[in-house]
Image (tube, rainbow, N blue to C red):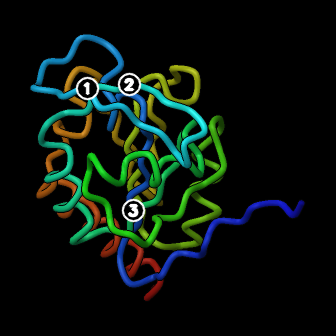
């Protein structure tokens, strides 16, 4: 069997790299309305998960400005499992086959494109979010997950990041 390689980014917009636990799925006590969904991928397993009720709307808003890429323990199952409850498109979003040391994988995958990594505070073994000059790391509140994202702020920060890199390239 050949090793999986993620589909390359389209390159027409910034990347939004998403974890699942504590981002799409609330693992602990939720601070927002959630609905428990029974998920499966290809009928091989079943799992009940709590998804914030407004998560689908938030993802659709994000998809207007970002190319979304999965990076989680759900791997190739993420898009298939969450397609129905989140109203995801038929075309599967790419995924990075990584659970640990995600930042290095994200940087390689982005290959110079602006990127935002949204994940649990526990991602990469509870290390503090790294300071990055090539992307933006966002650790969500696990009780609200993706609903805690300020999309306008993300757009502004990505614009500033892109402008800074464009200016560096002009020098």
Image coordinates of residue 51 in percent, x first then y, are 25, 33
Is label 1 in a helix, a strand or a loop?
strand
Give the class, few, some or many, for how many residues have Cα within 10 Å of label 2's Cα (few <14, many ≥20): few
Q: CA distance from mark 1 to mark 2?
A: 6 Å
Of the pair 164 and 50, the residue shown nearer to us: 50
> If you read the primary sequence from the N terminus, does the residue marked by circle 2 or circle 3 appear first?
2
Residue that numbered label 1 is attached to: 36
Q: CA distance from mark 1 to mark 3?
A: 23 Å
Q: Residue at x 32, y 38 (%)?
A: 24
Image coordinates of residue 153 in percent, x first then y, are 15, 54
Give the class, few, some or many, for how many residues have Cα within 10 Å of label 3's Cα (few <14, many ≥20): many
- The image shows residue 141, relative to residue 86, as above or below, that is above
Give the class, few, some or many, for how many residues have Cα within 10 Å of label 1's Cα (few <14, many ≥20): some
Image coordinates of residue 117 in percent, x first then y, are 42, 49
- The image shows residue 32, relative to residue 43, as above or below, that is above
Which picture quadrant has residue 159?
bottom left
Q: Residue at x 48, y 47 (%)?
A: 78
> If you read the primary sequence from the N terminus, does the residue marked by circle 1 or circle 3 appear first?
1
Residue that numbered label 2 is attached to: 48
Residue that numbered label 3 is attached to: 68
Q: Residue at x 36, y 54 (%)?
A: 83
Of the pair 139 and 93, the residue shown nearer to us: 93
- The image shows residue 68, relative to residue 19, as above or below, that is below
Which picture quadrant has residue 6?
bottom right
Badges 1 and 2: C-beta atoms under 8 Å apart? yes
Is label 2 in a helix, a strand or a loop?
strand
Badges 1 and 3: C-beta atoms under 8 Å apart? no
Q: Residue at x 89, y 60 (%)?
A: 1
- The image shows residue 53, relative to residue 5, as above or below, that is above
Farthest top residue in view:
29
């Amino acid at each position: 069997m050949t090793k999986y390689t993620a589909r390359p980014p389209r390159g027409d917009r910034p990347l939004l790299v998403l974890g699942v636990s504590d981002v799409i799925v609330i693992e602990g006590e939720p601070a927002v309305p959630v609905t428990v969904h029974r998920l499966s991928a290809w009928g091989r397993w079943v799992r009940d998960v709590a998804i914030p009720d407004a998560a689908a709307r938030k993802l659709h808003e994000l998809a207007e400005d970002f190319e979304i890429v999965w990076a989680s323990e759900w791997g190739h199952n993420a898009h298939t499992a969450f397609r129905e409850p989140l109203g995801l498109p038929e075309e599967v979003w790419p995924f990075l086959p990584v659970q640990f040391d995600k930042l290095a994988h994200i940087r390689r995958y982005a290959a110079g494109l602006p990127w935002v990594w949204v994940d649990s505070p526990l991602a990469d073994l509870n290390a503090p979010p790294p300071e990055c000059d090539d992307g933006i790391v966002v650790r969500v509140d696990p009780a609200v997950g993706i609903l805690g994202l300020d999309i306008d702020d993300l757009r502004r920060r990505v614009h500033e990041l892109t402008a800074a890199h464009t200016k560096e390239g002009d020098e």
